[in-house]
Amino acid sequence: MQQLLAPIHAFLKCETPDSWIQAAIKPENLPTLLIDHCNCELKAAQTAMFLVRKYAVEQQSGKQLLEWAKPYEEFVYRKDRDIAVFLARSSKKNDVSIELTAKAGFEQGDALISKMVRLIKEEFHHFEQVLEIMLERGIPYENRRAGRYAKGMMKMVRTHEPAAMIDKLIIGAFIEARSCERFAKLAPYLDEVLNKFYVSLLRSEARHYQDYLLLAEDIAGGDISERVAIIAEREAELISSIDPEFNFHSGAQE
């Protein structure tokens, strides 16, 4: 685990504050932690899908991606959702085989499609896994609005291309790296089921961060360390400063 986490710790400019860990392990905060984690997994899949649709594939391929996401989004946005019914059908929803056509003229299109489609499948699966744990514990699913962390990170995105795409990929790397770091920090304090589950997520989250970063470097066609450093400072500020809300990616807690 330490070998896996070493590059994560080097990439992030601060550790998760102890005050957040103390808040996260309070029994009364477990529903919020799991609900927000569940939402984060879905948002990660949606974000990756958006990147593929916007930058990498032709229109018809984009429609295929929307069809793939449709059952998940219908579950999330309907009021009379049933977790058990959704999970009973989940294996069919995520067992997809789609042929995506890359846009002409985008040299990194195939690499973006390959890495993001694998990430989407894994994030949808993680979404289902968290739902299973919530169902077993009698925790109903709720929609959650974007927290301070997500909003603060997205404000860093530049408004012109390809800089906007590069920034989105770098931010994706930080979100995945932070998730990995938090799973590792939280796991020892949780019950056996959650401990095992969070440890099982470390490898995929670590790979996701690396995939995002490699894509950003490839698309930039050069050194991105200066931009990474700028975003790293903002990410560390959001994590280390007091956050009035508690959620999976919130900052320090009073």
Image (cartoon, rainbow, N blue to C red):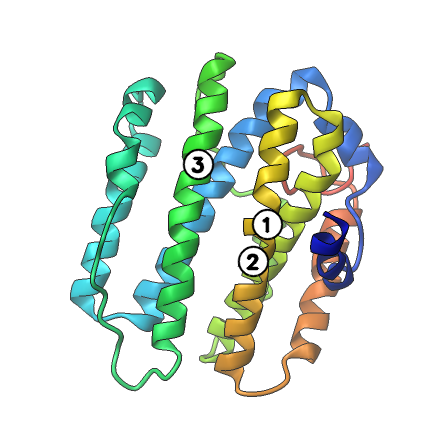
Rendered view: 163 above or below 154? below
Residues under numbered marks 2 and 1 in contact, where contact means CB atoms less than 8 Å apart: yes
Q: Nearer the viewer, mark 3 or mark 2?
A: 2
Query: Is 140 left or right of 21, judged from the image as shown?
Result: left
Rendering coords of residue 118 (x, y %): 40, 56
What is the three-letter code of the residue carrying label 3? Phe
On screen, residue 47 versus residue 9, left or right, reads left
Sequence-wise, the earlier of marks 3 and 2 is 3
Q: Which mark is residue 20?
A: none
Which of the labelled discs sits on residue 207, or is there none? 2
Indicate whether 206 appears above or below 160: above
Q: Are marks 3 and 2 in contact (CB under 8 Å)?
A: no
Q: Are marks 3 and 1 in contact (CB under 8 Å)?
A: no
Q: CA distance from mark 3 to mark 2?
A: 17 Å
Q: Is residue 110 above or below residue 239?
A: below
Mark 1 closeness class: few <14, some 14–19, many ≥20 residues within 10 Å: few
Q: Nearer the viewer, residue 62 or 3?
A: 3
Q: Which residue is mark 3?
A: 127
**Could you classify mark 3 by the number of other residues whose Cα lies within 10 Å: few (under 14), some (14-19), or many (20 or more)?**
many
> Distance of mark 2 from mark 1, alpha carbons?
6 Å
Residue nearer the viewer, 50 or 151 = 50
> Where does label 1 land, which residue?
203
User: Whole-percent x and y of residue 80?
Assistant: 29, 19
Q: Mark 3 or mark 1: which comes first in sequence?
A: 3
- Towards the viewer: 113 or 149: 113
Q: Please, what secondary structure does the residue beneath circle 3 have?
A: helix
Give the quarter of the figure containing the C terminus.
top right
Determine the secondary structure under disc 1. helix
**Separation of marks 3 and 1 at Cα, in angstroms:** 16 Å
Q: Residue at x 36, y 57 (%)?
A: 49
